[in-house]
Image (spheres, rainbow, N blue to C red):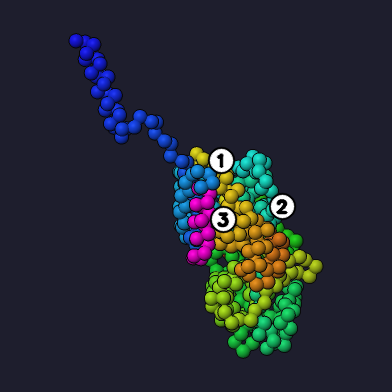
Amino acid sequence: MKNKVTIFIFIFCFTAGFVLAGGQSEEKVEEPPEITFWTLQQADIDIQSAQEKAVIDFEEQFNCNVEVTAFPYVELRDKMLTAVAGGQGPDLLLLDQIWVAQYAAAGFVEPLDDFVKTTNIKAEDYFPGGWGAGIYQNKMYGVPFDVGVWALLYYNKDMFREAGLDPEKPPVVWEEFLEYGEKLTGNGKYGTAIWVGKGDAVNCMTDAFTFSAGGRIVDDMGTKALLDKPEAIEGLGFWKACDSISPPGSVGRSEEDSFKLFTAGQVAMFFYGEWGQDTIQTRAPDMNYGVALLPKPEGGVSVGCFGGFNIGINKNSKYKELAWEFIKYSTKREVNEKITMLTPANKEAAKSYLQQKRKYPDIIYEQLTKALFRPMVPNYPELAEVQRQATQKVLLNQVSVEEALTEATQAINELLK
């Protein structure tokens, strides 16, 4: 009797298992791996479509799933930092250049040097400033995805003619820019429109002028501020001089407020990135404008200030190898030029992109090759605010340029300790 009971139990268990398995005895097939990527929302439908197609192609090539979630800039910044600080977040991190040092210092992002060594990704394929913006304390944490440069010189050719200036000869050096500006100022119109605003766009400009004069904001180790040096004083001094050919209210204006004055024909010259051409096409499609390199000091070099994004890998990702494959895929030329919101960071992709989508592509490309990045320090936002306040004090005539930058240097040195 005991043996019959044992046999019955065995048959029942086997049959139940067979039924619960749906009548199949094969092992369960593993789901393909899935990686997540948080990125920026795109207003351009063509870019959205290209990004979606790129993801599908990658999924087919690597037999995986890629979940992409897009956020507005501020939401991406806040959500991603909160997530990774809690040990969560996406596998792939789209990092504004000014976030890289913060993420690296906190251990939120994976060093990529060992990955880079095994592939054909190399520095010479990217704009030097874009590549350098992914490096913190001699380790690489982000591969350049796209770039933008502060700034190019936009100028209204018709306003040049009205002022007796040659529209095919934009100013090259600072002194010439100010001379042109004086001739273009009058009858309710102005040579340019500078700003301070609330963000760090104004720092991008004063940084660019400092770079053009041969200076830097902090030393190479990121441990000492250099704003009290002659080059930085010269750079901010030029921005201050531009206030004399700008409409009143520079401190309260943002960069976008000032750009509106240019597209409305109220100012003749303006400093802005290459992406500004899209705005001109929308607001003032009939404007006869030119684009030139950022003016430089006499004897200096026109050096812009980089913006843009790098792609990194979450330190807590379970699929680092697959995430790296996605970085390789999205930054190669034939893909990169189709899916970026700014100029592709890959130089060959950038050439193709600029030729297709921008006027004066060769000038833009030259400015991109001569651009440097903002300070790679973990607490960059605090540093940037010190800089911004120094500029504000100067434009309000509260202190001299030298006094403002000496004070700023001391404050930044405290932050860098």
Element under disc 3: strand
Q: Point out the stretch of residues depicted in magenta.
A: 43-59
Query: What's the mark number on residue 124?
Result: 2
Residue at 58% across / 52% down in the picture?
330
Whole-angstrom CA distance, mark 2 to mark 1, is 23 Å
Q: Amino acid at mark 1?
A: Glu
Specify whether 122 is left or right of 145. Answer: right
* Label 3 or label 1, whichever comes before in sequence order: 3
Mark 3 Cα shell of 10 Å, populated few (<14), some (14-19), many (≥20)? many
Specify whether 205 is left or right of 95. Answer: right
Q: Amino acid at mark 2?
A: Glu
Residue 242's x, y, as percent?
Answer: 66, 75
Query: What's the mark number on residue 174?
Result: none
Residue at 71% across / 68% down in the picture?
362
Q: Which is nearer the eye, 107 or 328? A: 328
* Label 2 or label 1, whichever comes before in sequence order: 2
* Label 2 or label 3, whichever comes before in sequence order: 3
Residue 318's x, y, as percent?
Answer: 50, 39
Q: Is residue 49 above or below residue 290?
A: above
Q: Amino acid at mark 3?
A: Asp
Q: Is residue 206 above or below residue 320?
A: below
Residue 54 colored in magenta in the image: yes
